[in-house]
Image: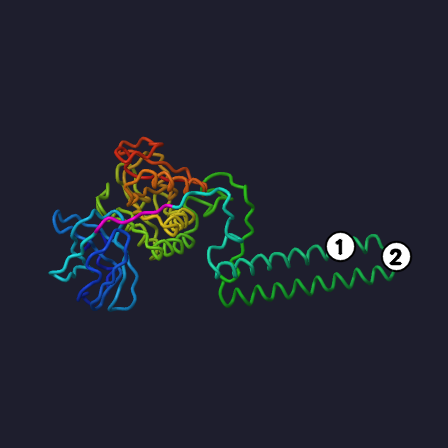
Amino acid sequence: MTFFGISSSVYAQATPTISGFKPTTASQGQTITISGQNLVPQVGFVHAGNQARTSAIGSAVDSNTITVTVPATLAPGDYIIYVGSANTGLDTLTVTPGNFIVPAYNPKAPAPLFGANSFAELIGAVFNYSFQLLGLIIFLTFLWAGFMWLGAGGNPGIIGKAKSRMTSAILGAVLLLSSYLILNTINPDLINIGFPLPGINIGPGGPGAPGGPGPGGSATASQAAAQRALSAGINFTSANPDCGNPYHASQNIQDIIAGKMPAVCSPSCNCVAGGPSGNITVDAFLLDSLTALRQSGVLFSVTSLTTGKHGANSLHYQGRAADIVLGSQNSADWTKAVSFLTSRGFGAFCESKGGSPDPNCNLAVTDHIHLQR
């Protein structure tokens, strides 16, 4: 059984009950708090008039309280709130238009230090770079000692100094390796060391590209990125899927978080977990870029990841493309969002319902923003 395209297996065994929510009037993008019993983060918004349904994933405070962000795509009006199959039976949420602010892209703005976006990430980055720096110092010390020995000309004093430096370098290497093994035993994530070389990129999804190698990158990296995306409050919608339920962005993201391969479709809606190769997932860098866009203040919904009807060679089917819809009705905001995504290396553009790029993001024509890499 499914609710809003979400399998009932994801819900707690105990039946949820809603006692109320606040505020009862909220704007698009505003957070509401739902109270009750046996609550789970999967929330449905059903329009009181036309019964249109939109799902969102909130955050569980505890089993009796959850918070959820009103999807930016909800049209203003009255909605019945569902958690699973439960609702208050009487109360409705009145949704009002939200205010959307998209910061202008500034190409001169400094990049985050070491690529870190938080203090915790900064500490980890400093440790990782220090680890690499120590290894380089040990190597250079050993190399310099070797040159000293070669150029000593039989001088016992110089040879003695060279031997002493070699011994120190070897001891340093042993200590460094020991610390690596100890940290790896405690938690492998502590030594998740990378050495990025900016500018080396042989193409989207390939070796050297963020999230590479392979289509969509690592499943583990994508799982972590999907969790970050949900924590940021991004709405992955299940509304009006081209290939029917459960082939939509909401199910894609749930499968990834559960450690499964998401369904990958074809233009004829032949949908298979992981695609023909069985190893296709949504690119982690793509998900993290959507998270960065949301954290910059932009409210939007993801309408398509690896499912739906697209061109035969669409990067959607490789986990390297997404479609998003902003809640803003201002075309300038859409243009700024495109610029933000382009600044992160994506091919991003407003796209019409007929599939043609719309460089002006004219909302009378534009249907969504398409991004790929």
Confirm whether residue 279 shows in the render.
Answer: no
Is residue 100 found inside the magenta-colored segment of the image? yes
Q: Is residue 306 left or right of residue 44?
A: right
Q: Residue at x 64, y 59 (%)?
A: 134
Task: Where is residue 202? Give x, y as percent.
Answer: 51, 39
Instruction: Name which of mark 1 and mark 2 comes first in the sequence.
Output: 1
**Amino acid identity at mark 1:** Trp
Task: Where is residue 80? Give x, y as percent.
Answer: 16, 56
What's the magenta region? 96-102
Task: Where is residue 109? Give x, y as percent.
Answer: 49, 46
Q: Is residue 287 left or right of residue 41?
A: right
Q: Mark 2 = which residue? A: 154
Pick the front one: 332 or 210: 332
Pick the front one: 7 or 324: 324
Mark identifier at residue 303: none
In three-dimensional space, the C-alpha distance between marks 1 and 2, rounded to whole angstroms, equals: 17 Å
Mark closer to the observer (1, 2) = 1
Q: Characterize the local packing of mark 2: few (<14), some (14-19) or many (20 or more) Cα atoms within 10 angstroms.
A: few
Disc 2 secondary structure class: loop
Assign the magenta stretch its main secondary structure.
loop
**Amino acid identity at mark 2:** Gly
